[in-house]
Amino acid sequence: MFVYISNIRLVGLIFLVLSCAYIYFAGEIPLDFWSEEEVFNARTMPYMIGTCSILCSALLIAMPSTHFNWNALRGLNWFPAGLLLVMLSLYGLLLEDLGFVIATTLLLLISFAMLGERKITRMVSISLGLALGFWLLMDQLGIYLAPGLLESIFGELTFA
Amino acid sequence: MLDGILLGLATVLTLHNLMLVLIGCAVGTLIGMLPGLGPISAIALMIPVTYGFEPASGMILLAGVYYGAIFGGSTSSILINAPGVAGTVATAFDGYPLTKKGQAGKALAIAAYASFAGGTLAAVMLVLLAPFLAELSLGFHSADYFILMLLGLSLVSAFSAEGEYLKALLMTCFGLMLSTVGTDLSAGVQRFTFGRMDLIDGISFLLLAMATFALAEAILMILRPAVEESSPMPQTSALRLSREESIAIAPAIGRSSVLGFLVGTLPGAGATIASFLAYGMERNLSNENEKQEFGKGSLRGLAAPESANNAACTGSFVPLLTLGIPGSGTTAVLLGALIAYGIQPGPRLFIDEPQIFWSVIISMYFGNLVLLVLNLPLIPYIARLLLIPKPYLIPIIMFFTIMGVYLVSFNTFDIQLMLFVAICAVLLRLLEFPMAPLLLGFILGGMLEDNLRRAITLSDGQIDFLWQRPVTVILVALTLLVLFSPLIRLVFANKSLTRKST
């Protein structure tokens, strides 16, 4: 009982700290001489929201009456989910250098494999098909997606 | 009003827009059917597609996606007992037992007829009610809007699950906080950008909606692998209903449609609450023998929540179109889309953009017809989508969510920001913090600030605008009531809890 209460209080505390930080940074919003005199300036709304948020977090700490079953957090597949998020982040970083087709094919291929698929031909055909198909569709619609490596290997690539 | 209806008909009855209704319903059904992906994800995924369209066409498509997603959700509820949408959880109570009895076809047919009737009846009520409300709200001032938005935000928290009130309120505050990131347009100063150019325009609502719903739901699918149903895809039997069966469910459909519509118009309530209320109402109204049937495959128990959730979807357009205030996460995303198209939402929408106002309403009749005529016979084929293995489905969903955001900004920073938001959203969802209030707060944040600034400026820096007009006073009183009654209850509940434990 005690453990669960202190845990939900911890969440409330995190929110309280975040809200205080928000108010602090609201005070850093640059104001010119005139708007400092005004009743409603760029800082007013953030101050109001921050105050409400501090009140709510404080209430959550004071009255942690929400029942929460911490066991629900056990036995989750953190590892594959985390790995997939890292993959997506890398995809974002490399998308423009590797080029859309290569980056997307790799992303899909590795994610399929990571989630347990083992049929190589099916994996390759789906990932390559989706990446190429999407790229061609965007090309036809006149939307530019970085060709990246493909362009440096094969030269100018446009079908439109 | 007749002019409006004719204008709506003229807009909808073009080949282009009819096709969009068709596509919207089909895509909505497909996405809504996937367990875990609800109407918010479905709409968010389709918004980038609509950027090239006229605003009216865009809204027609998205409205189609909305009720298509609800319809699709009921299909997976009935066939594999895995509701794709919270609004169709009650559908599974009696729908899945019918499937187990080998009457999946009949269950799907009832769901389709009930949805059609619910959606169409609600659309009639919408036509009657919306213009009236829109005209009434024309007399509202900035102050009234400010209070009305606060009321909407507090209602969403008040309607949240038992004991989750504070969490919902906190999420609303965080949504409001996120909305202040970017350049303050009135003063031209940057707020909370921490010197980053990428944040000057603020966080896009599409990014937030995709990250907190579609992407977070995909991550949750990996974190919490569903217990695989060992039973293979059920065969769908004949889709026919007998005369007696139709007569038995007709009154249930009528009652539930009216109830669903009314609940749907309330901000914060929406399809989920409507479907549970309708199910409960039907159960209470039936005699002892029929009551035994509920939960074991009662036809009335299936028809009631199905008509109610579709009627509630239509009902939720009332506050959206007349006041410009969304009542649910889904309508908040639709409002975000409207703003992204450059349309000013609010009661003037009815006067300034009658085309959008009426075409969305009229398109609902066609959408419901499409769902009935086209989707019903195709359902056995569409349902094969449920057989796509998760290792393929999840990465593909993730790819489309990321592309949806990237193709609007062409900024890879957005991908990283989206992942960060999605991680926070997953953690919060695991801690049972609701995400819809966050989205609602985020989308209403800008308008809330504008209206408050205008009200304060007009009253020379005083806050007496809060009690100068009767309308405002009533709204303030209502807001305070909604905001504080759960808090007071919470204090009392907490007191008795501590008394018990000591």
Image (cartoon, rainbow, N blue to C red):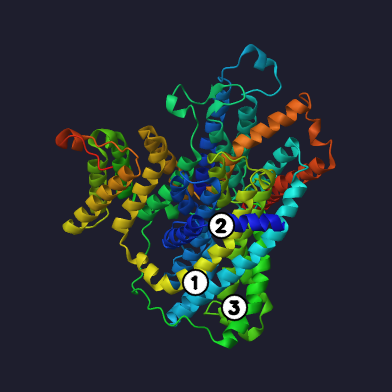
Q: Say what amino acid the circle numbered 2 marks.
A: Val
Q: Is residue B256 toward the left or the right of residue B47 in the image?
A: right
Residue B247 x, y percent position in the rendering: 62, 84
- At x 68%, y 72%, the residue is B255
The correct choice, above or below, for B414 with respect to B403 in the image is above
Q: Chain letter for mark 2, please.
A: B
Q: Is residue B365 toward the left or the right of residue B410 in the image?
A: right
- At x 39%, y 52%, the residue is B218
Q: Say what amino acid the circle numbered 3 marks.
A: Arg
Q: Is residue B470 toward the left or the right of residue A10 in the image?
A: right
The correct choice, above or below, for B200 with respect to B6 in the image is above
Q: Say what amino acid the circle numbered 1 marks.
A: Val
Farthest-out residue, left:
A153
- At x 65%, y 84%, the residue is B288
The one of B286 and B457 positioned closer to us in this rendering? B457
Residue B325 x, y percent position in the rendering: 65, 46
The one of A50 and B136 positioned closer to us in this rendering? B136
User: Does residue B348 appear anywhere in the picture?
Assistant: yes
- List the residue tagged with mark 3: B300
Q: Secondary structure at mark 3?
A: helix
Q: Chain letter for mark 1, please.
A: B
Residue A112 x, y percent position in the rendering: 25, 53
The one of B112 and A6 positioned closer to us in this rendering? B112
- List the residue tagged with mark 2: B12
- Discs 1/2, front: 2
Residue A41 x, y percent position in the rendering: 65, 22
- List the residue tagged with mark 1: B373
